[in-house]
Amino acid sequence: MPEMNIIEAIRDALTLEMTRDERVIVLGLDVGRLGGVFRTTDGLQERFGKDRVVDTPLAEAVIIGSAIGLAISGMVPVAEIQFLGFTHQAFHQMGAQLGRFRYRSRGRFPLPVTVRAPMGGGTKTPEFHPDAIEAQFVQYPALKIALPSNPYDAKGMLLQAIRDPDPVLFIEPERLYRKGRAEVPAEDYTVPFGKARIAREGKDVTLVAWSAAVEVCERAAEQLATEGVQATVIDLRTLVPLDEETIVKSVESTGRCVVVHEAPLSAGFGAEIVATLQENAFYSLDAPIARVASYDTPYPPASLESHWLPSPERVVRQVRKLLSA
Amino acid sequence: MFQLLDPAGRLRNGAKPPLDDEFVLEGLRWMLLSRAIDARATALQRQGRLGVFSPVLGQEAAVVGSALALDPSRDWLVPQYRELPAMLMHGYPLHKHLLNLMGNPVEGRIPDDVLMLPTQVALAAQLPHAVGIAWGLKLQGKDGVVMTYFGEGASSEGDFHEACNLAGVVKAPVVFFLQNNNWAISTPRQLQSGAASLADRAAGYGMPGVQVDGNDLLAVNQVSREAVARARAGEGPSLIEAITYRMSFHNTTDNPSKYQDPAELEAARARDPIARVQAYLKGRGMWDEKREQEFEQAISEEIDAAVAKAQKAPVPNRSQIFDNVFAELTPRQAAQRRELLGEG
């Protein structure tokens, strides 16, 4: 089986789907000749031509807005926004328009549109680039939100996203793009939405995360293991749809839970997870459910970001606290 | 400003009408229908039988003249919300529009063979969609053209700029039809832009821009045909600025007496687009009182039938809140639906 990093897995999925379905069109800033600022679309324009891999003007709202029109005309657009932090300039087209068209057209215009964007910090990018604003899109309830954390999921979930009859915001973990290679099947496969991945199983505590925070939890779990604490790590994979069953079941068995995310604490999606567990697993809890998130400040300058982002150390500290409660 | 008919309905020196008289008569019929719907819908709104309504009053020539340039079997209509006659001309049934205004979640659906988007209340948000459709048609080798509508207020939005800019780059077969009716609710034209002409902005996007008398059915139709032909020939987008005037309120919640000079409205009435076409057709022996009565009678019956049909539509069911969210509801949505229906 070939080994790929996340960049290569995404490129593999795009190549596969563009070959299989000629309605698929990739558009965004620098996706053509350059192959994307992270090279996820490298070589695609040579292979599929300038009409199917399109360098657009620098304008996020019309990248998304025209993708809506392209889909209505019968195409299957995969739009790239260079960084999730830049989607704010397309926020209306993303949430209110893309995430609503099937509904507002009474079912006449379903939109098979995928919007790809990398998210998260830890790479010392300039301001706005790393903002983890995924939860803001959850408030538009007709947008699916997928966040793979590893190469296998990146390929299978992207194929799932492009084939989904509804719009999908596909958020990629920027920090993990080239973190390492893993086995990824060369053939066609999909990873269904709404099914969380249990990355590691342990009986003492459940760590819930998505995107790059999954890797933080895995490192925390390794540290905890050396202290004799067995942690389960759950990778949600999608926020919409949300796999309540897997997290509830896990917390029912461990009795303790820490939710970890890169977005600032207040009104982050972690609050939704905590509320869900409180409603469904309350009587199994041995300790309050905790959150480890970034602080409620603007994203700090690069030299301070490692103090701001959730770290394995903070997660471990929080777990120790729960265990002594 | 391009004009073929003067306000008295006389062809300007040397002007050749782009439409034969039967077609002009057809245009007039749509204009009269539009005005009669404005009156009826406003009355229904005042009786609490219809939601907020935005009349077309005063802008009939701009809307009808441009829509007459389209071929509904292959061209797309992307409206804002003040273009009802264009929607009807494109094949959207009036009773469905009324059902949308009544808040019916199902019956207002655009029929599958009508190439039109729903009305758009987020101003200018439809312009990127129009460009995307046009671009997609071009990429798929189809010969359709997209006509999209918006006002001078919407032209201040970022989506207008981004849409025009992309359309110019990809040479999308789209016509940007800007109805400059002088008012964005209470904000007058001069507060929207420092540009002397909004049509001049087209140059910045590498497309032609033309200013036309929006109360002149023939002139509007001629520039619209030219823009559609240009788009169809693969030459790209155009911007048309139709100078017209909103002769009524913004919508049924508005009160123009707070901001509008009555003298200005009077001057606009002297430029009424319907009176102009009627005078023109009269001069050609195609219009008289008898014909007017026949038209009015037929239009009144058409509206009666649509209102009756709308009122007979099935009462919405609360479960429909969850229809058309996704192809398949998420487990959460499905649980919420069960709760709503008392099944949870």
Image: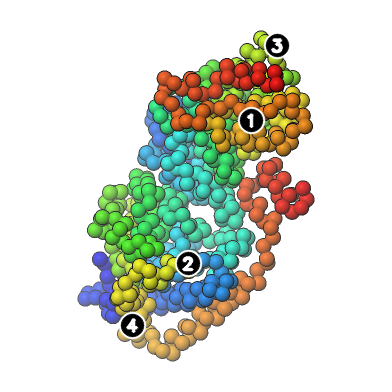
Question: Which of label 3 and label 1 is nearer to you?
Answer: 3
Q: Observer-nearest residue: A292 or A104?
A: A292
Using the numbered discs, state the Cα–Cα distance from disc 2 to disc 1 in whole angstroms. 46 Å
Q: Residue at x 61, y 18 (%)?
A: A317
Q: Chain of mark 1?
A: A
Determine which residue is flagged by label 2.
B253
Helix, strand or loop under label 3: loop
Residue receiving disc 3: A228
Q: As displayed, is residue A216 above or below residue A115?
A: above
Q: Quadrant of residue A89?
A: top left
Say which of marks 4 and 3 sits in front.
Answer: 3
Q: CA distance from mark 4 to mark 1?
A: 69 Å
Tag 2 near tag 4, CB within 8 Å:
no
Is there any visible trace of residue A145 in the rendered image? Answer: yes
C-alpha gap between disc 3 and disc 1: 25 Å
Amino acid type of the residue tagged 4 in the rendering:
Ala
The image quarter containing residue A248 is top right
Q: Which chain contains the residue that carries disc 3?
A: A
Amino acid residing under circle 1: Leu
Q: Residue at x 47, y 67 (%)?
A: B253
State whether discs 2 and 3 lie on one chain.
no
- Please tell me which residue is depicted at 52% across the width and 45% down the height of the picture: A95
Label 3 or label 1, whichever comes before in sequence order: 3
